[in-house]
Amino acid sequence: MKQSLIPAALALLSTTVGAPSTAAPDPVHTDGDKYKVLLENEHVRVLTYTDQPGDKTHLHAHPSFVLYALAPFKRKIGLADGRSFEREFKAGDVLYSQAQTHFGENIGATPTQIIMVEMKPERKQTQATTAVAKP
């Protein structure tokens, strides 16, 4: 009986508000015409995103990220739980966001132009232990 509860618990965790779901795809794959990878390493992934007024993205997930607006734009963001909100940015605005699963729509009169830095989880570094001889 306990084993049958595990999938249900995992399903509930994956729908946590704002948390990315493992079922939600990578935005570079869902909207590769809009997202481009500039740099990727073990610490971060740096993306550019560009769209036109009226453009929409598919549902996708981001880990925690920093967004930098290159130009002014206005967007509607729809979260995986059905809630939505609007955001308006001026050139030079910076935003930090926790991980989230969402889709977006350009509801303004200008293209969206951003740089996004996605954070990757820190990996534990292994250190060699040195034995110290006692006299």
Image (cartoon, rainbow, N blue to C red):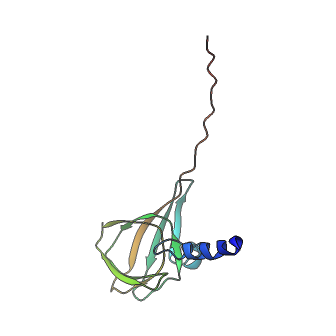
Specify the quadrant that holds the N terminus: bottom right
Q: Residue at x 57, y 50 (%)?
A: 123
Q: Is residue 129 above or below residue 124?
A: above
Front residue of this view, candidates 55 and 27? 27
Would residue 23 be seen by someone viewing this image from the given angle? no
As drawn, the residue found furthest toward the front would be: 1
Front residue of this view, candidates 108 and 43? 43
Q: Is residue 6 above or below residue 134?
A: below
Front residue of this view, candidates 104 and 111? 104
Q: Residue at x 50, y 82 (%)?
A: 57
Q: Can you give x and y, in whole percent of width and height, for residue 89 in the image?
A: 31, 74
Q: Quadrant of residue 31?
A: bottom right
As drawn, the residue found furthest toward the bottom would be: 54
Q: Can you give x and y, in whole percent of width and height, for residue 54 in the image?
A: 41, 89
Would residue 59 be seen by someone viewing this image from the given angle? yes
Q: Is residue 79 left or right of residue 133?
A: left
Specify the quadrant that holds the C terminus: top right
Q: Can you give x and y, in whole percent of width and height, for residue 76 in the image?
A: 38, 83
Q: Quadrant of residue 108?
A: bottom left
Q: Is residue 13 above or below residue 126?
A: below
Q: Residue at x 69, y 71 (%)?
A: 2
As drawn, the residue found furthest toward the top would be: 135
Front residue of this view, candidates 64 and 117? 64
Q: Count all numbered tags in the image, as a single digit.
A: 0
